[in-house]
Image: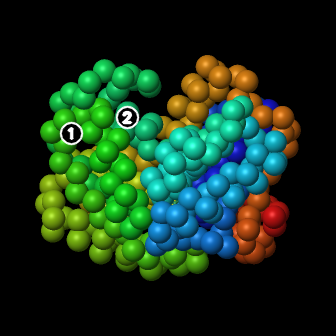
Amino acid sequence: MAVGIFDSGLGGLTVLDAVTREMPEVPFVYFGDNRNAPYGVRDADDVYDLTCAATERLWAAGCDLVILACNTASAAALRRMQESWVPPGKRVLGVFVPLIEALTERQWGDNSPPREVAVKHVALFATPATVSSRAFQRELAFRAIGVDVEAQACGGLVDAIEEGDMILAEALVRSHVDALKRKMPAPEAAILGCTHYPLLQDAFQAALGPDVAVYSQADLVAASLADYLRRHPNMHGPGEEALFLTSGDAGRVSDRATQFLRREIRFQPI
Ligand code: DGL
């Protein structure tokens, strides 16, 4: 009954942690493509090819359903995968939609026309590839009108986190928040549109100030995935074992993951 969780590297562990808490009975197979991270500086074709290869690896591990716990892959590759690549009996889902539904206070699957929502000024922090795709703004426009989104491409942040250099990462958060505030001085809400960024949620909140509501994806994705699996019990794949797989250096990745999740995580090389 395994389900696959994919990210370019360590960021998807923030989602893995939340889905494991929400559904302790489900064996999740995590795949971090650490060798090829970061994805956020790659072009869309490259992200598509890498994401398809990673998804096939998770299918081979007995997961019929794969969650792209990576905004960059969700923004740059998911639609193309769903439209022309995913075979019958398999599913690939992303992490954007649950976040937008929370921001716009919509119920899961509400397909009514876009309407005015309470939040008018939204700051989006994401990778360069996610920002240039404009996928967030496109998905938001299906559901809400009159929302001003200012996006900040957070160059260097994923690299710093993958390297475990949290002092550099915190300095980058402060400078990216400053850059955002020069364009939008008083955002009401901030979206952490990269699954690596919740590892720095406190730094974002401190730099933004206490009045800004900071949205991150992990718990929202966990709630939507639990709901999805209740409605589609057939999407539990045949795999039975929870696994952590990486294309990178398994020892190094395990150490970082253990540090981030504050519990022992052992990755296997693919
Ligand atoms: N965690 C990925 C995301 O959500 C990071 C992408 C990258 O590797 O740059 O976008």
Residue at image position (33%, 54%) is 134
Q: Is residue 256 left or right of residue 250?
A: left
| Residue 129 image-quadrant placement | bottom left
Identify the secondary structure beneath mark 2.
helix
The residue indicated by pointer 1 is 119
Q: Residue 251 placed where, x, y %?
A: 78, 73
Quickly name the residue at label 2.
102
Q: Is residue 177 visible?
A: yes
Q: Where is residue 39 shown, x and y percent of the image?
A: 53, 67
Q: Which residue type carries mark 1? A: Val
Residue 9 lies in quadrant: bottom right
Residue, x 71% and y 31% (percent of image)?
Answer: 89
Question: Which mark sits nearer the N-terminus, 2 or 1?
Answer: 2
Residue at image point 57% right, 44% down: 84
Residue 68: x and y, percent?
Answer: 58, 49
Quick check: 7 above or below 253?
above
Q: Position of residue 219 (x, y in %)?
A: 51, 40
The residue located at (32%, 29%) in the rendering is 105
Distance CA(mark 2)–CA(mark 1)? 11 Å
Say whether residue 30 is left or right of residue 149.
Answer: right
Image-based side of 226 in relation to 132, left or right: right
Using a 10 Å C-alpha cutoff, classify the residue at mark 2 as few (fewer than 14 neighbours), some (14 to 19) or many (20 or more): some
On the rendered image, what quadrant is the N terminus found in? top right
Say which element carries label 1: loop
Q: Quadrant of the C terminus?
A: bottom right
Horizontal side of residue 254 vs 76, given as left or right = right
Kind of residue at disc 2: Ala
Residue 256 in view = no
> Coloring scheme of the render?
rainbow
| Above or below for 177 versus 104 | below
